[in-house]
C-alpha cells in the first residue's frame, strides 16, 4: 500500500493517474466498477420476519394471545381461531406499516444526504458524497464533512477536526508538505485528510486516495450502527398510556370474571365476558395509526421544502413560540447587487465609476482579487456578496478570472463570520499587498492611513467621521456595506490574523439584498399565531434594522442590539431583556446559543436557523434546529432537526402550520379510536352489571377495532390542513395529549354511542333471540363508530368545516359500510362472525340508532359555536363600552 503522505502532491496525482482537470466520465465509471460506491456498510437491518415477530411484543397483544389460548382450552376454539387470525392480520399490517414508514424516512434522509464539490472533466460540480471515486479532486471549505480519505494538494490555512478518528478535540492545521517516516500516526499525517472529519476553518483542495470501507473511518467503524429512529414524545406517552390501559383492563376483566362466576355463570361464559371487555378496550390500531400519520405528514412537508430529519420535530413544531431567523438568504433573497461605491470624498452609483481614475479602478480590481466567486462562467458560483462584486466587474468589462491570473494570489485568510473579514495577498506591480475586505466597524479601528487621489496619508478623525457617516447613510437604506483596506507586506511572509492591522483605507462598496416577497406576510402570520419572529444576523445593526422594519419584525417599542452589547450582559440580564429585542446584529455564532437559552429559560419553544459550521451548537440547543439546504454547510444540516430546501423563512412558518395540523389530526384519530373503544367497554360493563347476556363476541370487537375503525382513523390523519390553526396560540409543549378535557369528551362521546348500542341490544333481546340481539348491538356499534369518524374531524360542526372537504373520510365510511354489510349479508361470513340474519325493519333500527350519536354530537357542536359567537359579540360590546 502506498503511503501517500510520503509523496509530493504531484507524485500522488501521478500515482492515482489524475490530471489537473480531474477525472473524466469514463474514468469515473471504470473506477466505480472497480471499487464500488463511497459508502460505509450499514449494520445488519432487521428483516421483515423479525419486524413481524416484534409486533407480538406489545403487552396488549400478549393479553389477546393469552385470552385466545385460554378460550381454546375452555373449548371455544372457534373464538380462539378468530382472535389468532386477527392478531396475525394485525401483525402483518404492523409490519407493512413499519417497513413503509422506514422507507419514507430513508427517502427523506436521502433528500438531505451529504454532497461533495468535485472537479470532473475540468468543471467544478456538486455530487452526492457516495459517488466520489478514488482520484477525484475535491474542494473543501469550512463546514464540510470530508467524504473520503485524501492527500491535500492545495492548502489555504485549512483546519480540520479529526476527533471522530483520533479523539483529539482540537482542530489540526494541515499542510501540503511531504512527511517522512514509515508508520506515521493518523493524527500526524498533516498532509492527509480523512473521511468523517470536519473542516472548521479555511479551505483546501484534495485528491481522494481511499473511499468507503477502505478509509480510516471505514476500518474503525467496520459496521455502521443501523440508525435507530427515536420515538417521538407523543409515541412515548401513548406507549405509557397503553401500559396503564393494559393494567386497568386486566383488573376490570378480572372483576367482571369474578362477578359472573359469583352469579353462577359457566366458566367459559364468564371468561368470554372478560375477554370481550379486554378486546373492546384494547386500541390495537392506535400505534400504527400514529406512525402512518406522522410518516404521511413528513412526506407532505418534504414536498413543501421542509425536510424533517428528526421525527420529534413534527410534534414540537406545533409548540414553537419563537423563531430566530438569519437575515441573509432566509428573510432576504440573497441576490446582492452593488448600488454604490465610495472612494476618497466621492459617492458613485454602481454604473458611474470611471476606470481611468486610479482610486476607482483599484477599488474594482481589489474587489475581484479579494473574492473567490465566479460569475463569468455559465453559472454564478460562490458567496452572493462576492458575486455582487464580480458582477460589478462585468459592468466594466473586467473578467475576474483574467484579473486573478494577472495578479496571482500568494496567500489568504478566508472569510469567517466571527471575524467578518477576508484577506488575500496578491502580487501587484512587483509589490506584495495584503487586500482585506469586510465589515467597516471591524476594520475602521485597525486603519491608520487613507489613500486619496494625491496618495496615502494618515487617517484623521475627520476622515473617520465622514466614512462612518457614509456607512450609516448606506445602511439606513438597508444596504450591506463592505470596506476595502490594504497594506504592503514583506515578501515570503505567510500572513496570520495579527496582520489584519495598521491598514490603509481605500473605499466602501454598498449592496442591496431585497427582502423575499413572501417574508412580510410570513412574519405577520407568525405574529398573529402568537409566535415571536426574531432576526439574528452578522450584518450591521442599521442595515438589519432597516430590513427588519420593512418586513415587520422590528416594531414600535422593539429593540435592536449588537453582539458586543450581549457580551456585557449576564445570562440573567439577557433573560430579562430578551423579550424586548427583535433584532440582533453583528452577532457571532456563540451569541446565538445564549439567545436560544435565554428564550428557553422563559419557557419558550425555540426554532433557530443556521448555516455555518459554528452554528451547529446553537442548532442543537434549539428545540428545533433548522439548517439551510442551499447555503448551509453539511455540519449545520447534520445538527439540525429540519432542513429547508429553499432556505426560505416563509417555509418555516408553513412548517409550523403543518406541525400544528399534523398534531391535531393525530389527536383527532386518537379521540376517534378511544371514544369508540370506550363505547365498547361501557356496553360490556353495562350488560355485565345489569346481568344481561354478553352483547358481543370477541370477533365482533376485533372486527370493529381492526377493520372498520382503522379506516376512519387514517382518514382523520389525512384531514386537509386548516389555515385557522394559525389563529391559535402555540400549544404548551408540556401539556399531555390526554388532558382531562380530552378524556372527558372521549367519555361523553363513548357514552352516547354506548347508549345507542345498548338500545339496539335491548330491542334485539325483546325477540328472545340472543344472537340477533348481539348482531344488532355489534352492527349498531360498528356503524355508529363509522358515523363518528365525521364527528372527530374537528371541534367545529361538520357544516362549518364542509361535509365533503375530506374525501378520505367518505372513502373510509364507504369501505366500512361495504365490510359491515358483507358480514351482515354474506352467508359464509355470517357463520364466521357469529351474526344472524336481519329483517329490513331491524336493519332500519340499526341505521337509525347508529346515526343518533352523530346527530347529538353535531347539534352540540353547532350550538356551542353559536354560543361562542354570541358571547364574543357581547364581549366586544362590553369592551367598547369600557372604552
Ligand atoms: P445572516 O445570514 O446570519 O443573516 P450574514 O450572512 O449577513 O448573516 P455574515 O455572512 O456573517 O452574516 O456577514 C457578516 C458581515 O461580514 C457582513 O455584514 C459583511 O460586512 C461581512 N462579510 C460578509 N461576507 C463577506 C465576504 N465574503 N468577505 C468579507 N466580508 C464579508
Image (cartoon, rainbow, N blue to C red):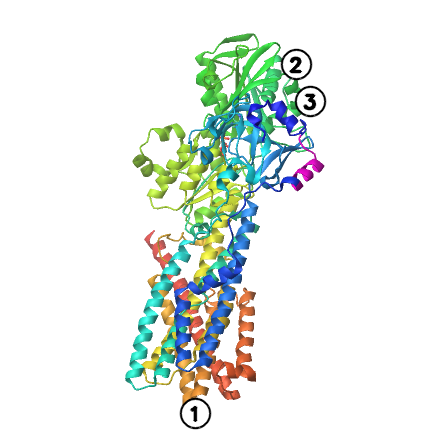
Residue 480 shown left or right of residue 556 in the figure: right
In-front residue for pair 619/326: 619
Q: Is residue 226 above or below residue 587?
A: below
- Disc 2: which residue: 356
Real-space CA distance between mark 2 and mark 1, rounded to the nearest whole angstrom: 109 Å
Q: Position of residue 310 (x, y in %)?
A: 47, 48
Q: Examine the structure image and report whether residue 771 is included in the region drawn in magenta.
A: no
Of the image marks 3 and 1, the number of the one nearer the N terminus: 3
Categorize mark 2 by other alpha carbons within 10 Å: few (<14), some (14-19), many (20+): few
Categorize mark 3 by other alpha carbons within 10 Å: few (<14), some (14-19), many (20+): few
Real-space CA distance between mark 2 and mark 3, rounded to the nearest whole angstrom: 13 Å
Q: Tell me, for residue 767, which label it has, or none.
A: 1
Categorize mark 1 by other alpha carbons within 10 Å: few (<14), some (14-19), many (20+): few
Q: Secondary structure at mark 1?
A: loop
Q: Please identify the residue farthest to the right as the structure is shown.
A: 26
Q: Position of residue 692 (x, y in %)?
A: 35, 85
Tag nearer the camera, 3 or 1: 1
The residue segment tinted magenta is: 22-33
Of the image marks 2 and 1, the number of the one nearer the N terminus: 2
In-front residue for pair 741/173: 173
Q: Is residue 300 above or below residue 586?
A: below
Q: Tell me, for residue 599, which label it has, or none.
A: none
Residue 132 shown left or right of residue 765 in the figure: right
In-front residue for pair 754/564: 754
Q: Secondary structure at mark 2?
A: loop
Is residue 758 visible from the viewing direction of this image?
A: yes
Circles 3 and 1 in contact, beta carbons < 8 Å = no
Amino acid at each position: 500500500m502506498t503511503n501517500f503522505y510520503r509523496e509530493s502532491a504531484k507524485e500522488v496525482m501521478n500515482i492515482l493517474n489524475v490530471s489537473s482537470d480531474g477525472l473524466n466520465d469514463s474514468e469515473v465509471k471504470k473506477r466505480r466498477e472497480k471499487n464500488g460506491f463511497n459508502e460505509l456498510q450499514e449494520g445488519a437491518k432487521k428483516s421483515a420476519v423479525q419486524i413481524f415477530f416484534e409486533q407480538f411484543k406489545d403487552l396488549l397483544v400478549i393479553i389477546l394471545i393469552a385470552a385466545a389460548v385460554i378460550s381454546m382450552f375452555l373449548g371455544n376454539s372457534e373464538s380462539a381461531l378468530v382472535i389468532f387470525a386477527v392478531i396475525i392480520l394485525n401483525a402483518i399490517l404492523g409490519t407493512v406499516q413499519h417497513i413503509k414508514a422506514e422507507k419514507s424516512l430513508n427517502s427523506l434522509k436521502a433528500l438531505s444526504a451529504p454532497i461533495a464539490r468535485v472537479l470532473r472533466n475540468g468543471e467544478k460540480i456538486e455530487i452526492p458524497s457516495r459517488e466520489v471515486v478514488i482520484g477525484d479532486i475535491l474542494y473543501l471549505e469550512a463546514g464540510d464533512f470530508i467524504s473520503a480519505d485524501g492527500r491535500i494538494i492545495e492548502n489555504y490555512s485549512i483546519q480540520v477536526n479529526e476527533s471522530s478518528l483520533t479523539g483529539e478535540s482540537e482542530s489540526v492545521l494541515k499542510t501540503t508538505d511531504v512527511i517522512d517516516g514509515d508508520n506515521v500516526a493518523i493524527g500526524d499525517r498533516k498532509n492527509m485528510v480523512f473521511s468523517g472529519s470536519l473542516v472548521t476553518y479555511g479551505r483546501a483542495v484534495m485528491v481522494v486516495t481511499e473511499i468507503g470501507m477502505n478509509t480510516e473511518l471505514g476500518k474503525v467503524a467496520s459496521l455502521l450502527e443501523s440508525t435507530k429512529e427515536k420515538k417521538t414524545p407523543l409515541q412515548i406517552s401513548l406507549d405509557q398510556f397503553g401500559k396503564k390501559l393494559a393494567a386497568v383492563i386486566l383488573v376490570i376483566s378480572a372483576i367482571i370474571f369474578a362477578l359472573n362466576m359469583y352469579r353462577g355463570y359457566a366458566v367459559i361464559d364468564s371468561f368470554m365476558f372478560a375477554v370481550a371487555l379486554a378486546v373492546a378496550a384494547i386500541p390495537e390500531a392506535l400505534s400504527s395509526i400514529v406512525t402512518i400519520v406522522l410518516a404521511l405528514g413528513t412526506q407532505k412537508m418534504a414536498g413543501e421544502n421542509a425536510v424533517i430529519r428528526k421525527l420529534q420535530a413534527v410534534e414540537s413544531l406545533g409548540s414553537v413560540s419563537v423563531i430566530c431567523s438569519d437575515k441573509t438568504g432566509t428573510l432576504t433573497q440573497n441576490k446582492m447587487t452593488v448600488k454604490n461605491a465610495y472612494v476618497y470624498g466621492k459617492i458613485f452609483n454602481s454604473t458611474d465609476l470611471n476606470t481611468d481614475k486610479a482610486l476607482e479602478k483599484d477599488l474594482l480590481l481589489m474587489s475581484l482579487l479579494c473574492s473567490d466567486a465566479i460569475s463569468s462562467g455559465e453559472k454564478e458560483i460562490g458567496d452572493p456578496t462576492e458575486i455582487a462584486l464580480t458582477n460589478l466587474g462585468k459592468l466594466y468589462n473586467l473578467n475576474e478570472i483574467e484579473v486573478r491570473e494577472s495578479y496571482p494570489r500568494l496567500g489568504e485568510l478566508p472569510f469567517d463570520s466571527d471575524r467578518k473579514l477576508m484577506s488575500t495577498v496578491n502580487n501587484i506591480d512587483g509589490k506584495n499587498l495584503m487586500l482585506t475586505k469586510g465589515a467597516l466597524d471591524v476594520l475602521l479601528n485597525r486603519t491608520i492611513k487613507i489613500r486619496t487621489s494625491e496618495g496615502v496619508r494618515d487617517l484623521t478623525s475627520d476622515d473617520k467621521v465622514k466614512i462612518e457617516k457614509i456607512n450609516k447613510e448606506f445602511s439606513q437604506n438597508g444596504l450591506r456595506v463592505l470596506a476595502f483596506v490594504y497594506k504592503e507586506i514583506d515578501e515570503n511572509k505567510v500572513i496570520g490574523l495579527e496582520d489584519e492591522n495598521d491598514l490603509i483605507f481605500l473605499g466602501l462598496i454598498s449592496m442591496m439584498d431585497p427582502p423575499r416577497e413572501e417574508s412580510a406576510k410570513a412574519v405577520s402570520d407568525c405574529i398573529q399565531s402568537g409566535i415571536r419572529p426574531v432576526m439574528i444576523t452578522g450584518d450591521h445593526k442599521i442595515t438589519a434594522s432597516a430590513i427588519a422594519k420593512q418586513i415587520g419584525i422590528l416594531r414600535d417599542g422593539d429593540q435592536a442590539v449588537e453582539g458586543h452589547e450581549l457580551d456585557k450582559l449576564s445570562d440573567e440580564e439577557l433573560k430579562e431583556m430578551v423579550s424586548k429585542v427583535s433584532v440582533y446584529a453583528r452577532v457571532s455564532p456563540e451569541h446565538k446559543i445564549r439567545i436560544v437559552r435565554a428564550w428557553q429559560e422563559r419557557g419558550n419553544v425555540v426554532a433557530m436557523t443556521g448555516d455555518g459550521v459554528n452554528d451547529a451548537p446553537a442548532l442543537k440547543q434549539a428545540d428545533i434546529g433548522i439548517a439551510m439546504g442551499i447555503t448551509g454547510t453539511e455540519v449545520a444540516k447534520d445538527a439540525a432537526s429540519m432542513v429547508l430546501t429553499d432556505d426560505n423563512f416563509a417555509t418555516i412558518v408553513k412548517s409550523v402550520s403543518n406541525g400544528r395540523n399534523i398534531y391535531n389530526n393525530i389527536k383527532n384519530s386518537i379521540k376517534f379510536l378511544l371514544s369508540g373503544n370506550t363505547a365498547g367497554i361501557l356496553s360490556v360493563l353495562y350488560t355485565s352489571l345489569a346481568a344481561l347476556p354478553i352483547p358481543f363476541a370477541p370477533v365482533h370487537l376485533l372486527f370493529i377495532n381492526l377493520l372498520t375503525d382503522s379506516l376512519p382513523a387514517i382518514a382523520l390523519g389525512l384531514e386537509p390542513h386548516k389555515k385557522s390553526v394559525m389563529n391559535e396560540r402555540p400549544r404548551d409543549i408540556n401539556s399531555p395529549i390526554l388532558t382531562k378535557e380530552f378524556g372527558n369528551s372521549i367519555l361523553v362521546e363513548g357514552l352516547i354511542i354506548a347508549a345507542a348500542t345498548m338500545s339496539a341490544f335491548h330491542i334485539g333481546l325483546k325477540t328472545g333471540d340472543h344472537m340477533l340481539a348481539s348482531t344488532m348491538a355489534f352492527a349498531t356499534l360498528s356503524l355508529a363508530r363509522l358515523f363518528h369518524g365525521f364527528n372527530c374531524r374537528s371541534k367545529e360542526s361538520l357544516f362549518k368545516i364542509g361535509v365533503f372537504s375530506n374525501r378520505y373520510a367518505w372513502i373510509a365510511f364507504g369501505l366500512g359500510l361495504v365490510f359491515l354489510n358483507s358480514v351482515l349479508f354474506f352467508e359464509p361470513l355470517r357463520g364466521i362472525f357469529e351474526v344472524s340474519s336481519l329483517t329490513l325493519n331491524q336493519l332500519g333500527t340499526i341505521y337509525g340508532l347508529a346515526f343518533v350519536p352523530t346527530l347529538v354530537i353535531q347539534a352540540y357542536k353547532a350550538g356551542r359555536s353559536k354560543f361562542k359567537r354570541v358571547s364574543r359579540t357581547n364581549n366586544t360590546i362590553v369592551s367598547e363600552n369600557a372604552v
